[in-house]
Image (tube, coloured by chain):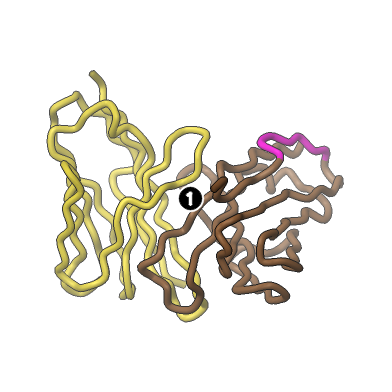
Chain colours: A yellow, B brown
Amino acid sequence: TQLLEQSPQFLSIQEGENLTVYCNSSSVFSSLQWYRQEPGEGPVLLVTVVTGGEVKKLKRLTFQFGDARKDSSLHITAAQPGDTGLYLCAGGPNAGNMLTFGGGTRLMVKP
Amino acid sequence: NAGVTQTPKFQVLKTGQSMTLQCAQDMNHEYMSWYRQDPGMGLRLIHYSVGAGITDQGEVPNGYNVSRSTTEDFPLRLLSAAPSQTSVYFCASRSPTGWGYNSPLHFGNGTRLTVT
C-alpha cells in the first residue's frame, strides 16, 4: 500500500507570512496532484506535477516534485486569508488506477 | 454544466438502516469514484468505475455496494449502516480513463452522513 504523509497537519499564520507544506512517501509516484478544499465543498485541483524535480508556480503558490518522485512541497509566499483551507496531496495513479491521498494540511491565515 | 452533483447533502441514519447516496455527472466522464473523508485521514477510495457496467473495489469497500448502469450515474449503497460509516462522502469523476494522470478529479460537494 502506498502512503502519503503530509506535514504539518495544522498551520495557523498571520497574513503576509510565508509557509511550506510537505508531502512525503517511501513510494515512487508517477505524478503528484495538489488540491485545495474549502468548508462544505469538494477538493479542487491546483496543480499536477509529473517530472522529478519539476517546479510549477501558480501566482503566490510554488509546487515542487522531488527528484526521486517520492515527495512534494507547496510553498505559499505572502499568505492571504483567501488561502485558508485544507490542502491535500494525491499521488498516482497506481496500477489499479487509484489515487492515494495524504491526510491533509489545514491552513488558517489570519488577517 | 453542473459538474458532479451529489444528493442528499446531509443524512442521519440509525444503525442497521440502508440508504443510497446519489451521484450524477454531466461531463461525460468515463471514470467515477466514491471517497470517504475522515479527520486526519484524507480521502480514502471506496469503489470506482471506469465505465458503464464496470466497477471495482478501492481501499475501503466493505459495507458498500455500487453499480454503474449509465455513464452519468454512480450510486453508492450502504447495506446496513454502522456508526463507523459516519463520514463525509465525496463522489468524483475524471476523464479520460487509463493513465489520465494529468486530468483532474472533479468532486461533488459531498454528503455528510451520521449513523447513530
> In this picture, is B83 found above or below A63?
above
| Lateral position of residue A24 relative to residue B85, left or right | left
Disc 1 is placed on an element classified as: loop
At horizontal 41% and vertical 60% (from top left) the residue drawn is: B104
At horizontal 55% and vertical 56% (from top left) the residue drawn is: B92
Q: Residue furthest bottom?
A: A95
Residue B67: % across, % down: 75, 66
> In this picture, is A90 found above or below A93?
above
- Total count of labels: 1
| Lateral position of residue B63 relative to residue B48, left or right | right
Q: Tell me the kind of residue under disc 1.
A: Met
* Quadrant assignment, res B99: bottom left
| Lateral position of residue A51 relative to residue B40, left or right | left
Locate the C terminus of chain A by quadrant: top left
Residue A15: % across, % down: 18, 24
Q: Residue furthest right?
A: B17
Q: Which residue is mark 1?
A: B41
Q: Residue furthest front?
A: B1
Crowd tier of the residue under label 1, counting other residues whose Cα lies within 10 Å: few below 14, some 14–19, many 20 or above? few
Q: Is residue B10 shown in magenta?
A: yes
At horizontal 62% and vertical 61% (from top left) the residue drawn is: B46
Residue A2: % across, % down: 42, 70
Q: Is residue B98 shown in magenta?
A: no
Residue A27: % across, % down: 33, 73
Magenta extent: B8-14
Please state which of residues A18 and B72 is positioned toward the viewer in this rendering. Answer: B72
Please state which of residues B38 and A51 is positioned toward the viewer in this rendering. Answer: A51
At horizontal 15% and vertical 61% (from top left) the residue drawn is: A55
Q: Which chain does the residue under circle 1 lie in?
A: B
* Quadrant assignment, res B34: bottom right
* Quadrant assignment, res A102: bottom left
